[in-house]
Amino acid sequence: MTTDTATSKYGIGGLRAKFGERWAGLPKWQRSLAFIAFVIFLYYLPYLGIPGLTWLRTDYIANGNNWAGVLFTCAVYVLIAIGLNVVIGLAGLLDLGYVGFFAVGAYSVALFGSTQSPVVKSLQAQFGLSEEWAVAWAICIPIALCLAMISGVLLGGPTLRLRGDYLAIVTLGFGEIIRIVVRNVEWSGGPAGIAAIPGPQGKPSPDNNVFGLIDAKPWYWLALTTVLLIVWLVRRLENSRVGRAWLAVREDEDAAAVMGVYPFKFKLWAFAIGAALGALSGLLYASRNGFIEPNQFNAQLSILFVAMVVVGGSGNMAGVALGAVLLAYLPERFREFSEWRFLVFGLALVLVMLIRPQGLIPSRRRARELKDRQEEVAVGV
Amino acid sequence: MNFDELFGHLGQHTVDGLSKGAIYALVALGYTLVYGVLKLINFAHSEVFMVGTFAVLGTWTALGATSNPSVGMMILFLLAGLVAGALASGATAVGVELIAYRRLRRMNAPPLIFLITAIGLSLVLSEAFGLWQGRLIKGMPTIVEREILFTIGNTEVTNTQLLTIVSALVMMILLDVFINRTRYGRGVRAVAQNPDTAALMGVNKDRVILLIFLLGGLLAGAAALLYNVRYGNTRFNVGFLLGLKAFTAAVLGGIGNLRGALLGGLLLGVVEVYAATLLTSSWEDVAAFTVLVVVLLFRPTGLLGESLGRARA
């Protein structure tokens, strides 16, 4: 074990700790100034032509440059990673069906917002509304959040009493059930999917001057704003009573229960909040795409989401955001190798787990938990 | 709800379900063996099975197999396929243990790390075959031509169904004898009961763990042969759904319990065929997953309870 501490003193972890100390030692105004500069940089990013980074091959823009579109994808994935991080990183529950909540969000806006959806059509017939009528985009957001939280509680309620590894398999099964059911029933548009999904400016049309079909920059700014808001909220949550309860439950469920923290309740909260964030990102994704179909929400995507969190460093928001950006950006940048992408994701998962199980930018707390376990076995044998 | 069809040909659907479930049972044994000893869901076991199906197909192609061979050639193809499938699957399972799990055990990693590693490995294996063999469904010659052997009432039993069920039962009995009657089996049961005490009694823990991965792999290889004979095609992602169902079967019967895996597999196969008959075949996967969820909710220890051998209380 001594070798471990030695490497961490000089390795990446040590560098990070040093940097972290200096950062914490700066006066508050300098820190907020740096933070504001970073945020401005993020908003300015679509205009920056960083050589090598912004060249992205596309099939629909000549000479290929979809930099803003890729930034939007990255932002949506970051949102997913932050939501899933609440479940995996903070509460310590491995959810392999997260794509189900992503799908709930996407389908909420599609089913209630699109004039082509069977649900809207039946509502029109029921109340004698015009054929142009559909639920407004802004109202679809609370609908999506509510539906996702309800489905999170419905899924979590019975399953959260299970052991961790069983929970993973059951959620995987649930994600697949949702996909197959959506594909098999009529009212969801079936295997053909649903088109004409609205955005903030209503249904997709060439007249939309801000959230249009071609220019992705406003979409990126919308997603980025959502991400920043959610980061702020989740950070508040992490340092609250709820966040401490999650930590306690994750580290030792029985001890937490003895101390008066009811594990089931807080796990359920983590599930519901994670589900709501997943739905929010699904909603953004569906609005930008304008079209969804059930097979977009397959189990492989769930595993990709888990990979983002785990590779980045579960429990640490900067880490999972980095993981999400890497796993969203790299496949776009190296489209020539798109056949290889899931192989590379799999390899990345295995290598990270074997070499650096705490992730690229680990949460200090989680890294210590892992280390404690390693030292236990060193004493035990 | 097509009740007439189901109850009119109940025997037929049951036999069909049993032969389907026999394959699940063989794969489920792999999950159950590893879980019984290590308390670990070997998520990569589905790809161990997938490698087996490709090994069988490769052997048949190498031997120049064609549809409808003579009886002698048929037996040769089946035996060669069995050997190749079992060897390839066994080697894959052992490789997974040596490359990933052993290292993680040394680190005393939490269960979720094992699971994520296993998911990564299963992605690597299936994608590697997807790149190497192409992503389309690969057909193969019909080695055993379907024919009706005998009829009971209005139930027709075909040779492939009989072959599947009987070979699954035979392998099941062999494994049961091996675990309960031999010296190595005693070692497996000892490690399953208490690894540390077993180590103190002179059982080589690592060797026992390697042995159970090997056994699970061999059985998955046999299942791969039966799958190829029954369905006549394979694909790089064939393991995902089948693995999930086999895991369901293992949990249904009581994970860690060998006889439970057989019972769970057969039962799940029958349930699926019934559901496909009542509704349409697109609902059969939903039925399997619903069984998994319901079993875990109401009886997480499964029908026969969790234990490897009779030793554990």
Image (cartoon, coloured by chain):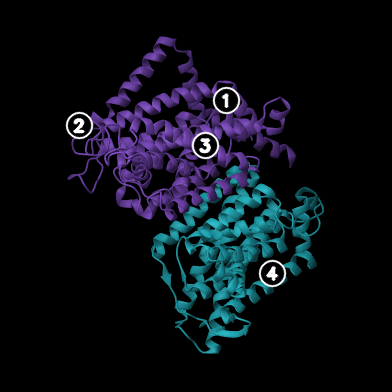
Q: Distance of mark 4 from mark 1, alpha carbons?
A: 49 Å
- Residue for badge 2: A209
Seen in the picture, residue A218 relative to B90 is either above or below; the reply is above
**Left or right side of A37 for B240:** right
Chain ID, mark 2:
A
Residue A37 point in image, percent of width and height = 33, 19
Residue A118 in the image: state x and y as whole percent.
Answer: 36, 47
Q: Along the line of sight, which residue is nearer the eye, A311 or B264? A: B264
Q: Nearer the viewer, mark 4 or mark 2?
A: 2
Residue A243 circle label:
1
The hue of chain B in the figure is: cyan
Between circles 4 and 3, the one closer to the viewer is 3
Chain under disc 1: A
| Sequence-first tag of 3 and 1 | 3
Residue at (55, 51) in percent of width and height: B118
**Quarter that holds the N terminus of chain A:** top right
Q: CA distance from mark 3 to mark 1?
A: 21 Å
The amino acid type of the residue labelled 1 equals Gly
Determine which residue is flagged by label 4.
B172
Q: Secondary structure at mark 3?
A: helix
Indicate which label's residue lies in the foreground, 2 or 3.
3
The kind of residue tagged 3 is Ile
The quadrant of the picture occupied by the C terminus of chain A is top right
| CA–CA distance in space, label 2 to label 1 | 42 Å
Q: Colour of chain A?
A: purple
